[in-house]
Amino acid sequence: MTFVVTDACIRCKYMDCVMVCPADCFREGEVMLVIDPDTCVDCAACWRACPAAAIEADSEPGMEGWVAFNREYAARWPMVTWKRGQAFLDADAFKEMPGKMERWFSPGAGAGDR
Ligand code: SF4
Ligand code: F3S
C-alpha cells in the first residue's frame, strides 16, 4: 500500500506533508508534489497533515491512475525533505478549485532540496 498525491495539491503545494514524512517519499514538481510509491511506508502522517486534503490512500476508489502518475513523476522530479517556505502565497485561493489538472499542471521539475 501507498499514499498518493492528487491534483488537489496543484497550485497549493503547502508542503506540510514533507515535514512529517519519516521515509523521504516526496518529490517536487513546479506546481505540486508526488509520493514515490516504492518508498512510502503507509504511515498516513502526510494524509493527516495536508491542509488541502490532496493525499489519498491507494486503497480508495479510483486511485489506480494516481498511483501510476505518482510513480511516473517520482522518477522525474527531485527529492524534497523540508519545507523551504510557502510555495504559493495565494495557495488558499486554489483550495478545492475544480479542473486544476487541466488549467495549472506543469510537468516541470521543482527545486527539490538545495
Ligand atoms: Fe511519507 Fe507516511 Fe505519507 Fe507515505 S504515508 S508518503 S511514509 S508520510
Ligand atoms: Fe500538496 Fe498537501 Fe503536500 S497541498 S505539497 S500534498 S501538504
Image: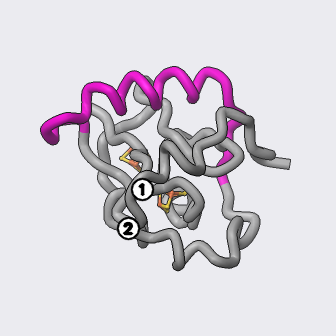
Residue under circle 1? 8
Which of these two is toward me, 105 or 2?
105
Residue at (44, 70) in percent of width and height: 95
What residue is shown at x 47% (from left), y 24% (from top)?
Answer: 71
Does 71 appear in magenta? yes
> Disc 1 beta carbon < 8 A from ligand 2?
yes
What residue appears at the point 51 percent right and 69 percent down from the top-left corner? Answer: 94
Judge whether 22 appears above or below 4 on screen. below
Q: Which residues are magenta?
A: 58-81
Q: Secondary structure at mark 1?
A: helix
- Horizontal side, residue 52 vs residue 60: left or right: right
Say which residue label 2 marks. Answer: 96
**Quarter of image, res 52:** bottom left
Label 2 near label 1: C-beta < 8 Å? yes
Type of amino acid at the residue the image marks with label 2: Glu
Q: Quadrant of residue 63?
A: top left
Q: CA distance from mark 1 to mark 2?
A: 7 Å
- 45 vs 107, nearest the viewer: 107
Residue at the (59%, 60%) spot, across then down: 11
Residue 111: image x %, image y %? 80, 46
Q: Position of residue 9 (x, y in %)?
A: 48, 55
Query: Quadrant of the image for the N terminus?
Result: top left
